[in-house]
Image (cartoon, rainbow, N blue to C red):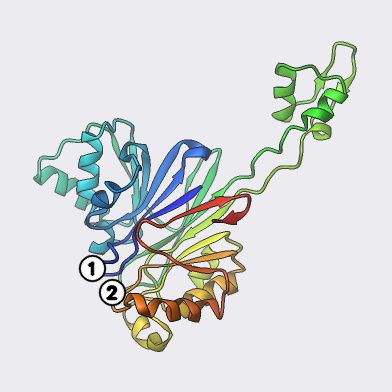
Amino acid sequence: MQLHFLGTGAGMPSKERNTSALMVKLLDEVSEMWLFDCGEATQHQILHTSLKPRKVTKIFITHLHGDHIFGLPGFLSSRSFQGGDEPLTIFGPSGLQQWIEQTLALSKTHLTYPLRFVEVQEGIIYEDAHFTIHAKELRHVVPCYGYRIEQKDLPGELLIDKAQALGVPKGPLLGQLKNGHDIVLENGDVVLAKDVVAPAKKGFTLSVLGDTKYCEEAIQLSMGADIIVHEATFDGTTTDLAASYGHATNVEAAKVAQQAGAHYLLLNHLSARFLPYDLPQFLAEAQGIFPNTFLTADQAVYTWQHNKLF
């Protein structure tokens, strides 16, 4: 899995940071990409990358503020022009479908692919053989959701040397063992899958939180998460101001990660008030509470591999 940040700013774009957009690349897992929020000019940000909009199969919108959705009409339209014909599902709060459909209708935009909408409510909003996605409403000034993406456990590795030592020949029998099926050899010996397959590997958990002030719901969505993407619109000197706008500080984000027992925290959605020379102190404040904290930037890419973030 890779996290590609296309926009890490808050409220409005700045020269350093575009508005909110995060591409979660699951190409190795399911050959798909999932987009979380789509602020203005997200498609322009994509032009500077090798990302292919046609590979995006799902879009998850946290809430209906403009800095999280104004890029959607352009992205949806361009996906058609760039060869997208596979279905696209958009998850988001009530009102999102109406806004998109009216925008497309009034602009006479024709899409070359089916568009499906899922109105998000708390609970499991998506599940397949590989992933389960939970949503929970956070505490912002409008309805806003956080998403918890849980990868299901991966099959254990087939211990080929051990299987061959038990007399299993190369071929389809090895595949049956890897899939968890016991087999019978030509000589009548039984080989049990559990004897030649390593234990299942735990899948990753990613929490992507929309705009929110510090709250218990954010902690619940992040319990034991491998990676938390949490807004940090303000710093520790403006806690009360942050809460009044329905936002969190860097320090509060770190407390969420600490209390949730997470492994890594990525600070996102930074106010333009913080200039480049402010950022080392901004990061240090959060790391003083939760050491595995990183500060996101536009076009930053993080890779999750072997239970570590690079």
- The disc label shown at residue 120, or none: none
Q: Of helix, strand and loop, which one carries label 1?
A: loop
> Could you tell me residue 294's position as x and y percent?
49, 67
Q: Residue at x 25, y 34 (%)?
A: 82
> Could you tell me residue 126's position as x and y percent?
46, 46
Which marked residue is nearer to the observer: mark 2 or mark 1?
2
Residue 227 vertical placement versus 54 (above, below): below
69 with respect to 61 (left or right): left
Report if residue 235 is visible in the image.
Answer: yes
Pointer 2: residues within 10 angstroms few (<14), some, or many (20+)?
some
> What amino acid type should be assigned to the residue bearing mark 2?
Ala
> What amino acid type should be assigned to the residue bearing mark 1?
Met
17 with respect to 219 (left or right): left
Residue 143 vertical placement versus 121 (above, below): below
Q: Nearer the viewer, residue 268 or 242?
A: 268
Q: Nearer the viewer, residue 82 or 130?
A: 82
Labelled pair 2, 1 in contact (Cβ < 8 Å): yes
Q: Residue at x 49, y 69 (%)?
A: 217
Circle 1 residue? 12
Q: Residue at x 52, y 63 (%)?
A: 221
Q: Nearer the viewer, residue 123 or 214?
A: 214
174 with respect to 149 (left or right): right
Circle 2 residue? 272
Task: Give the CA distance from mark 2 to mark 1.
Answer: 8 Å
Q: Of helix, strand and loop, which one carries label 2?
A: loop
Q: Residue at x 24, y 66 (%)?
A: 15
194 with respect to 229 (left or right): right
Q: Nearer the viewer, residue 223 or 162?
A: 162
